[in-house]
Amino acid sequence: MIGTYPNLTELEFADLPLLQPLFRELRDGLSEMSFAGIYCFRGSHAYRIGRHADGTLVLQGADKGVPFFISPFGLPPPELLAELFERFSSMKLATETQAAALAQGGGGYVVSEDRDNFDYLYRRESLATLHGRALQKKRNLVHAFDRSHAYESEVISPDRIQDALTVLEAWRATAADQADYAPAKEALEHATELGLEGRIYYVDKQPAGYTLGEPTAGGTMFAVHYEKTVPHMKGLYQVINMDFARSLPESITLINREQDLGDEGLRQAKLTYRPSGFVKKFRARRAA
């Protein structure tokens, strides 16, 4: 049950019927801003939720013990907003529209770009074709994989979840960073209820990779939340990236491949796919 502000409660699966439609109305395309995105990472970010007397929903979280708040469904009224900035260290995941309103609203808030959390956007057609000299190395990896392996892909339906979990466990066995293992496992186990979609990849008849995400921004964008493969399959990530883009409907014009979290290697890897833009996110704090 959602708490009554200022008493916030842990996010529960039972909150889905209320929150899912609200998240689906959002048009900014922030990868975190879906029920699946918040719910599956409720442990990682200690998410809690409450409803103010005026109806405003407030989300609280913490990064390394430092609390923040999120206001995904619009900025709260000025008095509540000021109270939230008194109670929490900062506002996280502010959209460009919210950032502009905070900076220009005269409330004494300092707004800054949160570059490590920018989402990378790619044109669906670009990932589906890998056309052009800049993406030649990606095409070469796909062609080399095609020559070396027989593979096929299928929609992740309920009867294929176990195969995807098999891939996840194989990935976990050698992954240096397993921070999203628990969220990825829960996302697969509740994919249907959470509204998540994806494809699973079989190499030489064995489950070898999968991708999972959801449409956002009114169905014009697809956010890829999870992409996993078994170890030692050079070129498989590139195959999955290309094949999945090809599988999406034309109504999806952009693919959101989420943030790099400040990891320089991951940043360079995302840049090599030549993003067409970013979903910018901002942090806001009270002026000192």
Image (cartoon, helix red, strand yellow):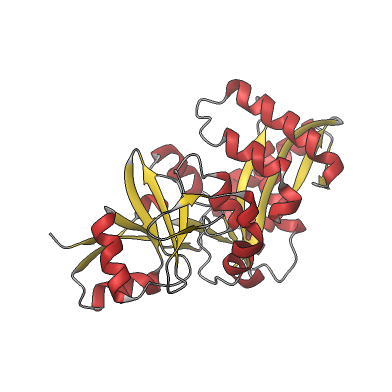
281 to 269, vertically: above or below: below
Residue 84: x and y, percent?
Answer: 30, 61
Q: In this view, does 280 lie above or below 199?
A: below
For image coordinates 25% across by 78% down, the residue present is 105
**Seen in the image, is 184 located left or right of residue 50?**
right
Left or right side of 238 for 281: left
Tell which of 74 and 138 is nearer to you: 74
Q: Is residue 204 visible?
A: yes
Q: Which of 235 and 28 is in front in this view?
A: 28
**Quadrant where the N terminus lies?**
bottom right
Q: Position of residue 56 (x, y in %)?
A: 44, 70
User: Looking at the image, can residue 196 be seen?
Assistant: no
Q: Residue furthest left?
A: 288
Q: Residue furthest top?
A: 173
Question: Of 275 and 8, which appears nearest the observer?
Answer: 8
Query: For this view, does 44 lie left or right of residue 192?
Result: left
Q: Residue at x 61, y 26 (%)?
A: 172
Query: Does 123 sit above or below residue 211?
Result: below
Of 51 and 105, the residue lying toward us: 51
Residue 261 position in % (x across, y down): 41, 44
Q: Quadrant of the C terminus?
A: bottom left
- Residue, x 87% and y 31% (percent of image)? 205
Q: In which quarter of the image is residue 100?
A: bottom left
Q: How many numbered circles does the render carry?
A: 0
Q: Position of residue 201 (x, y in %)?
A: 78, 39
